[in-house]
């Protein structure tokens, strides 16, 4: 069963998904969808409340940026990468693979 319909996801608007005991931040960028751990690697903040620019998401708490494609921490104060997850997009169905 899919997690979302693609047309439910607004471009650049993060959504939090709880799946298999994990909190995941899901972001649509044009017709691609990315999934990354929702909890910032710096402290306990939810990335799905952050802002997206291109392929970057910025943590709202202290401003660290992460690459949605790789999970890499791009700016301090975070310096630990986040886990990313494969996302299957078929027609209008979006499934995060965990
Ligand atoms: S909690 Fe995300 S940058 Fe500090």
Image: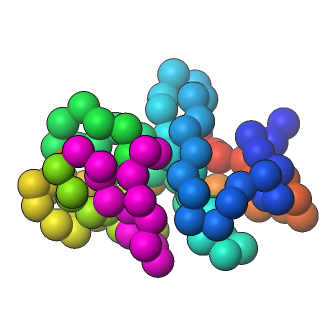
Question: Which residue shows up at 55% across the image and 39% down it?
Answer: 16
Q: How many marks?
A: 0
With 80 as the anchor, is 12 left or right in this view? right
With 57 as the anchor, is 40 left or right in this view? left
| Closer-to-camera residue (25/98) | 25
In this picture the colour scheme is rainbow
Q: In the displayed orientation, state which residue is furthest to the left.
A: 77
The magenta-colored residue range is 48-61
Question: Which residue shows up at 59% across the image and 36% down it?
Answer: 17
**Quarter assignment of residue 7:** bottom right
Q: Position of residue 63 (x, y in %)?
A: 21, 57
Q: Is residue 51 magenta?
A: yes
Q: Is residue 54 magenta?
A: yes
Question: Which residue shows up at 58% across the image and 45% down it?
Answer: 15
Question: Which residue shows up at 60% across the image and 29% down it?
Answer: 19
Q: In the displayed orientation, state which residue is furthest to the right.
A: 91
Vertical position of residue 24 compared to residue 64: above or below: above
Q: In the displayed orientation, state which residue is furthest to the top.
A: 21
Asked if one can make out residue 85 in the rendered structure from this viewpoint, the answer is no
Vertical position of residue 12 compared to residue 50: above or below: below
Vertical position of residue 49 compared to residue 92: above or below: above
With 18 as the anchor, is 39 left or right in this view? left
Asked if one can make out residue 15 in the rendered structure from this viewpoint, the answer is yes
Quadrant of the rendering where the C terminus is positioned: top right
| Closer-to-camera residue (14/38) | 14
With 75 as the anchor, is 70 left or right in this view? right
Q: Position of residue 1 (x, y in %)?
A: 84, 36
Q: Position of residue 40 (x, y in %)?
A: 28, 43
Q: Quadrant of ligand 1?
A: top left
């Amino acid at each position: 069963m899919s997690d979302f319909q693609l047309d439910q996801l607004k471009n650049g608007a993060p959504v939090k998904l709880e799946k298999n005991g994990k909190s995941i931040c899901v972001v649509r960028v044009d017709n691609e969808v990315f999934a990354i751990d929702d909890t910032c690697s710096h402290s306990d903040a939810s990335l799905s409340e952050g802002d997206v620019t291109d392929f970057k998401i910025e943590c709202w708490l202290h401003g660290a940026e992460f690459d949605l494609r790789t999970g890499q921490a791009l700016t301090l104060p975070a310096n630990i990468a986040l886990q990313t997850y494969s996302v299957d997009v078929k027609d209008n169905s979006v499934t995060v693979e965990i």
